[in-house]
Image (tube, rainbow, N blue to C red):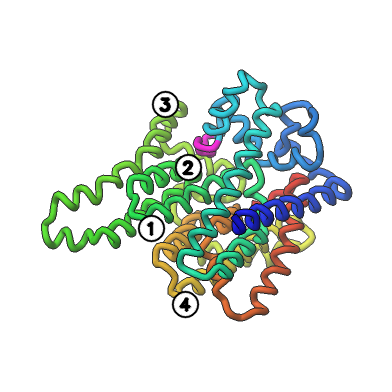
Amino acid sequence: MRHARRLIGFFILWRLLLLIPLFLGQKFLDYRASSEFTNIWYFIKPYAPVNQWFFYPWANFDGVHYLDIAANGYNTNGRFLPLFPLIIRGITQFFGSPPAFGAVYFFTGLILANLFFLISLFLLFHLVKKDYSEKIAWQTIIFLLIFPASFFFGSIYTESLFLLLVLLCFIFMGRHRWWLTAICGALLAITRPVGLIMFLVIGYEIIRQEKIISLLKNKSWRQLFKALLPLTILPWGLAGYLWFSLKKWGDALYFLHAQGEVANNRSVNQIVLFPQTIFRYLKILLTLSSQQYEWWIALFELSCFIFAALVIYVTIRKRMKLAYILYCLLGLLLPASTGTFSGLPRYVVILFPLFLALALVKIGWTKLLYLILAGIILLLTTMLFSRGYFIA
């Protein structure tokens, strides 16, 4: 009970602190010119109480697309996977047929995102405390909350749902509950494209825990079949969306190809090695003027990649579970192999073992420096996001 109260207290404090940049943004910063389409009021006339400065920014950018899909279904926004909007739609059906972008849809999406994140904090604390001290568990929670992209957990985005499902996967894997693990893995694949990495992580854990190699050597076919059978569930979520995409757009991989239609230079037809992307970002930083907003975003994205790469090195040095290291490596390299680091802060924030690794660092000033820098940047990124400036 004491842990529960403290976790809820951290969550509430985090939510309240995020109101500061929202207040400062609406007070001193105009909404970014030509970015009106990122705001909910582009789709519907302002209405109370959502028109308050502490509410409507949480639906900015991708949030309006998830609300649109939840209410109206898919049109050309197939790059957004369906699980989160389906959950929103399923709950709003209890309220009759509310208008698209109305208060019912908005608050359903907002409450769900925050509820998913609060549950994730409980699961993360439980998962870390199982292998480490209580102090390390609390520090992991704090380092996650203070990360500069953590505000996405409180927005109408998929980050909180994704983190929840990932943590459930690791918890169920630790208990040998492979059917439940596979169900969560299948749901991850229709939450965000990067969810596919969990197929490999789950496969590795089954091979390791169920001694698949030994079963093969001993030709224990019945036991082998029983051990591998849960893996057959993994593809079904994605397969269903591929079938839907084929029927809807005539392209089973439309959700990938549509990513290339976004103006972020993302490659969807070939793998681009991350050293090439680093070189491209260095070129941007050396040629663009620092007075351009895009220069600062490029610096932020590159910094997130360097941060994640360095902390993954720490996870290896600290000999963390190989499944954690594999999850972080794949979770970083998959988006970084598309020719751009655009959106990378959102990919990094869901890599929870990174924040555990920070908690395991014994050099005190390193943790203090992270808290100060990450805290300042979190306030800035939240303020800019609330005013229509792209962050990730």
Q: Which SS class for mark 2?
A: helix
In space, the residues marked 1 and 4 are separated at their CA atoms by 22 Å
Q: Residue at x 58, y 57 (%)?
A: 349
Which residues lie in the magenta part? 78-84
Closer to the N terminus: mark 1 or mark 3?
1
- In the rendered image, the residue lying farthest to the right is 28
**Residue 134's x, y, as percent?**
55, 67
**Residue 352's x, y, as percent?**
53, 60
350 left or right of 219 in image: right
To which quarter of the image does residue 246 belong? top left
Circle nearer the viewer, 4 or 2: 4
> Label 2 belongs to which residue?
256
Answer above or below: position of 390 versus 209: above
Q: Residue at x 47, y 42 (%)?
A: 256
Q: Which SS class for mark 1?
A: helix
Closer to the N terminus: mark 4 or mark 2?
2
In space, the residues marked 4 and 2 are separated at their CA atoms by 35 Å
Checking the image for residue 247, the label placed there is 3
